[in-house]
Image (cartoon, rainbow, N blue to C red):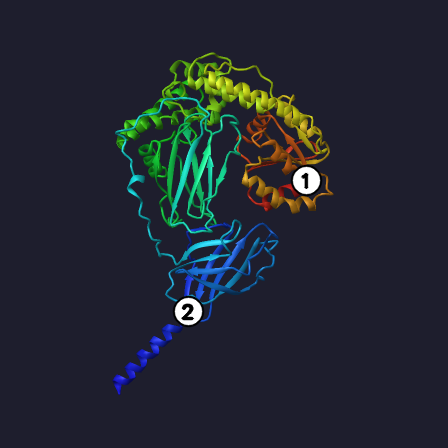
Amino acid sequence: MKRLIVLFTTVCALLSCGHRDVVWDQPVLSCSTEDAITIKKVVITDDKTAVHMVIDYSPQSWFRFAKETYIEADSKRYAIRGADSINLGEMSYTNPKTRLRNFILYFEPLPKKTKMFDLLEGTAQGDFTFFNIRQKGVKLPEAKIPADYLHDNSDDEVWPELAYSEEPVTIHIKALNYKPGMNPDITVWHFNITDPTSREGEEQIILNDDGTADYSTKIYLPQHVSVNYDTRQPLPRFISTATPFLVPGSEITLLMDMNISPDSVNNNFVGCKGFMEGFNNRYIKNYRNHSYPFPADGILENAKTVDEIIKIHDKWMDDMKEYFDKRNTPEFDRKHLFVYELRFFYWVAEYADSLFRTKEFSDYILSTRPSCIFDDSYLKANRDYLVISPLFVDTEIQGKGPDLSRFLNGVSQLRNGTNIKKPFIEDPDLSNLYDRLSGGINAEIEKNRKRIFAPNVHYLDLADVAPEYIQQTILDRYKGKTVVFDLWETWCGWCLKGHREMAPLKEKLKDKNIVFVYLATYSSPFDLWLRYTNDIPGEHYYLTEDQNKYISDHVFGSDGVPKYAIFDAQGKMLYKQQGWGGLEMIQTEIEKALN
């Protein structure tokens, strides 16, 4: 009898286990096409699979899940059956106050032993997709990396001969564990010497259904080309980066593994082959692992003399050498890594600008001739050259670095709407490119100046105002009003977020004695800037770089964007803020100013 009771109890326990719900709390995923949607929970029962989700968009934003949405697991599809809190195929809206919307999607029941699944609207561009949804702790299968993508030996490597060229580079991408519909957000960026302050150089790469793509572009001079893959996760974001060093005419293939995810410390870029593959493989592998010794925080800001700057520089160079020695960094790599010396001069200009602009500092640079500027055997195009370019503007010092500096400074001034004489550029190819660019830039600016703009759009119409007078000149136009300055650029995502979230407040205040003034520069492409002005009510100014820099330096002490300042009706500044911290903070200050 006792044995029968035990057997009966065991059978009941087994039967009850079969009916127990399976719950995944806070599941993880490898990639998505949407960074505003979080999967909070997955519940698998005998009759359905419930996926609990929350969306965090701007207030009162719409979204829609198609009626054809499905789950795929182990090569089998499970159809959607319904939803809670939203209607499939119809627009739903986020809460106007909290920005959130919680909802549940119901699907046919998955087997309770399921370890992983995908949730898809479809596989076309623009569809919601969530790949490799799984419980925490469930690992994705690792890809086997072909041996020819792992070469990192430097014995047979030589630095390429420095040469300017318009021959394009080609980047091939091959993705392992790729599934159609992943549509990964892969962008490529390089420093464009023909438009040196623009940040609109990012171009998107679309992978084919087999996970491959080819991309070509002109880079003109040796440089790192940044290839970025954004998994489109809710914050914190996970972005993988490969920065192969390329020269004009070179070609490289980058290998990705789509099964490396945010819960891993690795990079989705796992290897490369082609141009300088040994160096580039080492660079990809160590991209996130270097912690170079940098000058202590505040040390440059507190420097009082050029001698102090020189001592900081020399100590840092010694620290870098010691760092490389301890890590047995190959001599081949050290030549490249010492280009960080150029970044030091950027910091001096940023944090000790008054010393940077002295003749004493200029003489120091030109007398010591640091390798990052004057070594003609190794030079790479770099935005930091813009900072040191004023040192060479009125000189005829020869060398690839001074040539590039004068070229970048000249092109920047031209795009800024400033008429300048042609700088001394010894390299004939670089000189010819400058001639072609200057003619086209001047013609384009003159054409834009002659366009008829809306009354609230001011394209370089204050270009002749000296930088130290530009702020007061603008404020004088709106005497008697509360004025809000918004310093922004078209490429700045936080700037655009601020515009969207401030729109309801501006509508609410449209009958008040207040004007919103938007200040941008030519790092925002003209046509794109002009399109944005149609959608952002307020007064729009396209300033010269010097005017913008003066306001940034003297009002905010920084050149980042976005930045905001509030002035009362008499032109007195009441508040300033850098970065978008949400609507509540700036709304409070605006209401204070109005009251």
Q: Residues within 10 Å of mark 2 (few under 14, many from 20)?
A: few
Q: Is residue 70 left or right of residue 377?
A: right
- Give SS at disc 2: loop
Q: Is residue 472 visible?
A: no
What is the x, y in percent for residue 353?
49, 23
Instruction: Judge whether 165 appears above or below 69 on screen.
Output: above
Residue visible at 37% across and 73% down? 18
Q: Which amino acid type is marked by label 1?
A: Pro
Q: Which amino acid type is marked by label 2?
A: Asp
Quarter assignment of residue 589: top right
Q: Is residue 517 visible?
A: yes
Ranked by sequence position, the earlier of labels 1 and 2 is 2
Q: Residue at the far bottom: name it.
A: 1
Q: Foreground residue, 326 or 251?
A: 251
Q: Which mark is residue 409?
A: none
Instruction: Judge whether 548 appears above or below 90 on screen.
Output: above
Q: In the rendered image, which residue does mark 1 sit on?
A: 537
Instruction: Judge whether 141 appears above or below 378 on screen.
Output: below
Q: Foreground residue, 543 or 215?
A: 215
What is the x, y in percent for residue 285?
33, 39
Q: In the rendered image, which residue does mark 2 sit on?
A: 21
Q: What distance separates the C-alpha of mark 1 from that of mark 2?
A: 53 Å
Count of labels in the image: 2
Q: Residues within 10 Å of mark 1 (few under 14, many from 20)?
A: some
Quadrant (top left, top right, bottom left, bottom right) of the C terminus: top right
